[in-house]
Image (cartoon, helix red, strand yellow):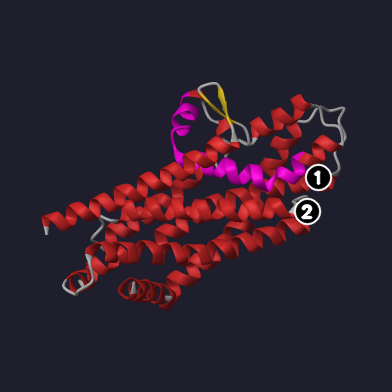
Amino acid sequence: MTGLGSLIGRNCRLFFKDKGMFFTSLITPAILLVLYATFLAGVYRDSFASAIPAEVAVDKALINATVGGQLVSSLLAVTCVTVAFCTNLLMAQDKVTGTRGDLTITPVKPATLALGYFLASALSTFLVSFVALAASLIYLAIVGWYLSFADVLLLFLEVCLLVLFGTAISSLVNYPLSTNGQCSAVGTIVSAGYGFICGAYMPISSFGDGLQKVLMFLPGTYGTSLIRNRALAGVFREMSAIGFPEEVLTGIKDSIDCNLYFFGHGVSQGVMFAVLAGSVALLVGAYCLLNMLRRQKV
């Protein structure tokens, strides 16, 4: 455990020592929140308004809280995964600089080395994601607060799970990388594309039927929906309390991906959580298997 602790400490220090990478990772959530509030707020507000019957009067604060919940859930869904790819680049950079080769000739076991990269990336991503979560909660408090203490705790838990998912998938994807060009290419692709395929930028319900079915096989889709349900839980309770018809509430949830349907069958939040947790286990298992095969070859 001493060797593992030293590796985790070493990897975390290198990440925080790289001021460019650290501050870029830290400021990215704030930039995304500003961009979302500036460009996507109107789209979300129109989507929400179109799902409400004309005869139903809705308080402006409730509308703002609904839009805010969509924005922060999109921010958290993207941040927890894309930041993990940044924090996990040390694995590839050590190969580029030759440090990985130096580490393999030390008494540290290959399994310990692999676990050190994973845990250090997870810890660094947790830090940045919790900063993003704090900023999101402050934003919700400004635009409209309907969350309970239990909602906040569950949101915290789901962010933790999504961070583990981001760390697991980034560990698996970054494992074979061995050049700076490959690292840059992967980072660019993930940053540009992940928000779309997980439903963070645009609701999956707005895509074509064929694409919707394909995206329902991706774990990130369920992670986004899970966080969105949690961020909007208080809003939905308030809507129900003031007399929103059940069919209207269902229509709103359908339009913003709080309700997901796998080939016509509704997916409960418990199943979403299980899918995401199972995906973490499978990805971590695959990462461990790659390291075991590498050890056998060596």
Residue located 53% across and 42% down the image: 273
Compute the Cα span from label 1 to label 2: 9 Å
- Specify few, some or many for label 1: CA neighbours under 10 Å numbering under 14, 14-19, or 20 or more: some
Q: Is residue 122 magenta?
A: no
Residues drawn in magenta: 210-236
Q: Going by the image, does 189 lie left or right of 216?
A: left
- Which mark is first along the chain, 2 or 1? 1
Nearest the eye: 248 or 147: 147
Q: Residue at x 53, y 44 (%)?
A: 223
Q: Position of residue 4 (x, y in %)?
A: 33, 71
Q: Which residue is mark 2?
A: 145
Residue at far front of view:
1
Determine which of the numbered discs, if any, sits on residue 62 in the image.
Answer: 1
Kind of residue at badge 1: Leu
Main SS class of the magenta portion in the image = helix
In this rendering, position of residue 210 left or right of residue 73: left
Tell me where residue 266 appears, x and y as whole percent: 58, 26
In which quadrant is the N terminus drawn?
A: bottom left
**Residue plotted at (44% across, 33% down):** 217
